[in-house]
Image: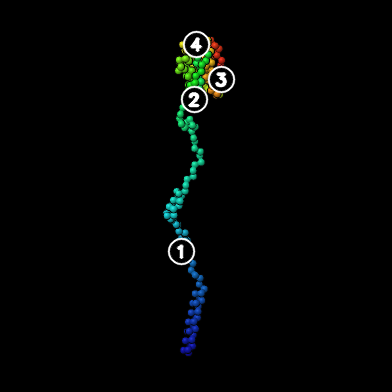
Amino acid sequence: MNKKIVIAGLLALFAIAGAGCASKQTSAPATPSQETQTSAAQNSTPEQTTPDPSAQSAENNGASQTPATPSTEPTKTKTDTEKSGDRQTQQITVYYTDTQENGLKEQKKEITYPSELEKFQKAFEALQKSGDSALIPLWSEKITVHKIKLDNGALTFDISLPDEARLGAGGEELAIDALKQTMFQFKEVKTLDLLVDGQSLESLMGHVDLEHPMSR
């Protein structure tokens, strides 16, 4: 009787133990909480890296050592006249007469001028004084020039002519010829016009007809 009870108790223990093992095998693993998943996701974010200062310095030094590209813009150069700043000098032929007004007498003179219009001014001034007692200027120093203009080969003088600078018929003709020959030696001058106080007169001094303009 006692043996049967012992055997029955052992069988009951084995049955209880077997049921506990089966219960452990069929139970599912616990699901992690939402908070844990979120925390894990946050922790999995890639870590931001700080640039290496030494690498940036090396990169900047490499950029600064790159040679600058030379400018391709052409250098502006001045003309020879502008570069030196010198006034131009030219030898010309100037025409006078003698004490008897026996035709025109020529003389070589050197003029210095800074511009083309100034060249004609200097040539006219050379007509007003010879520097030689044997050569008489036909254009008085009392004559002044108001304006000089050169337009496409047409040279125009606008002068004042006081009474004391006027000549007789022979002198007037020589004066006009002296002016023409002096100015027409410049190749750029094709025609010559002479005005008195801005007016185109029929005669310069009242004796000889004055052409407007005069040609070579």
Alpha carbon distance from label 3 to label 2: 21 Å
- Disc 2 marks which residue? 90
Taking the spot 54% from the left edge, 20% from the top edge, the residue there is 184
Amino acid identity at mark 4: Gln
- Disc 4 marks which residue? 100
Alpha carbon distance from label 1 to label 4: 133 Å
Taking the spot 49% from the left edge, 21% from the top edge, the residue there is 108
Alpha carbon distance from label 3 to label 1: 109 Å
Residue 50: give its label: none
- Coloured how? rainbow
Residue 59 appears at what percent x and percent y?
45, 52
Task: Specify few, some or many for label 4: CA neighbours under 10 Å numbering under 14, 14-19, or 20 or more.
Answer: few
Amino acid identity at mark 3: Thr
Q: Are marks 2 and 1 in contact (CB under 8 Å)?
A: no
Quarter residue 181 falls in: top right
Amino acid identity at mark 2: Gln
Question: In the drawing, does residue 212 fall left or right of residue 3?
Answer: right
- Disc 3 marks which residue? 191
Going from N to C along the chain, the mark reached first, 4 or 3, is: 4
Circle 2 sits in a helix, a strand or a loop, which is it?
strand
Task: Specify few, some or many for label 3: CA neighbours under 10 Å numbering under 14, 14-19, or 20 or more.
Answer: many
Going from N to C along the chain, the mark reached first, 3 or 1, is: 1
Residue 79 appears at what percent x and percent y?
49, 32
